[in-house]
Image (cartoon, rainbow, N blue to C red):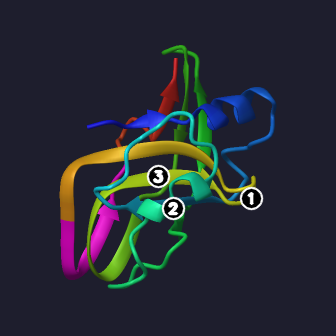
Amino acid sequence: MASGIYNRFKYNVMKKLLDLSSDTLKVILLTTSHAFNADHNELTDINANELAAAGNYATGGATLGSPTVTQDDANDCATFDGADVAWTGATFTAYHAAIYASTVSNNLIASIDFGGAKAVSAGTFTIQWSANGILKIS
């Protein structure tokens, strides 16, 4: 199981090229063929492993709603979070998800490994982010 943050995201943050709270962020679902590689930069580096459009999944993924960034001085960290992402009436199996910035040249942000097959049949497939946020820098 390998989740991680892409190097392009780190670069974009340090160069002030990405605003996690105002740029359009998308979440795609990936097959078992996906393997996280921190050196991947853009969606085109991983989209061969994206789920095919079927079972109420559209290629390109879903928009991440309510993206927020908060500063926590008590715990000396900053947190990025967003609304849970759901596909209704879904029938598919996913193994990973990836977040990317569609308004910043489709640059990759993070890859999330589900730890195995997550299947849904004529139901709702939901990615429920941690109560501690999607990403935390401390």
Q: Are marks 2 and 1 in contact (CB under 8 Å)?
A: no
Label 3 sits on residue: 98
User: Which region of the structure is painted magenta?
Assistant: 119-129
- Binning the other alpha carbons within 10 Å of mark 3 as few (below 14), some (14 to 19) or many (20 upward) gives many
Residue 127 is drawn in which quadrant? bottom left
Q: Can you tell which of label 2 and label 1 is closer to the viewer? A: 2
Q: Which of marks 2 and 1 is nearer the N terminus?
A: 2
- Binning the other alpha carbons within 10 Å of mark 2 as few (below 14), some (14 to 19) or many (20 upward) gives some
Q: Which residue is drawn at 57% across and 34% down?
A: 39
- Binning the other alpha carbons within 10 Å of mark 1 as few (below 14), some (14 to 19) or many (20 upward) gives some
* Above or below: residue 109 compared with residue 103: above
Residue type at mark 3?
Answer: Ala
Name the element at disc 2: helix
Residue 56, position in %: x, y? Answer: 38, 84
Label 1 sits on residue: 103
Q: Do the residues labelled 1 and 3 touch (CB within 8 Å)?
A: no
Residue 27, position in %: x, y? Answer: 50, 60
Label 2 sits on residue: 47
> Which quarter of the rendered picture does the N terminus lie within?
top left
Q: Which residue is drawn at 47% across and 63% down?
A: 48
Q: How far apart are marks 2 and 1 (CA)?
A: 17 Å
Residue type at mark 2?
Answer: Asn
* Above or below: residue 110 compared with residue 34: above
Residue 104, position in %: x, y? Answer: 75, 52
Q: Which of marks 2 and 3 is nearer the N terminus?
A: 2
Q: Residue at x 19, y 51 (%)?
A: 116
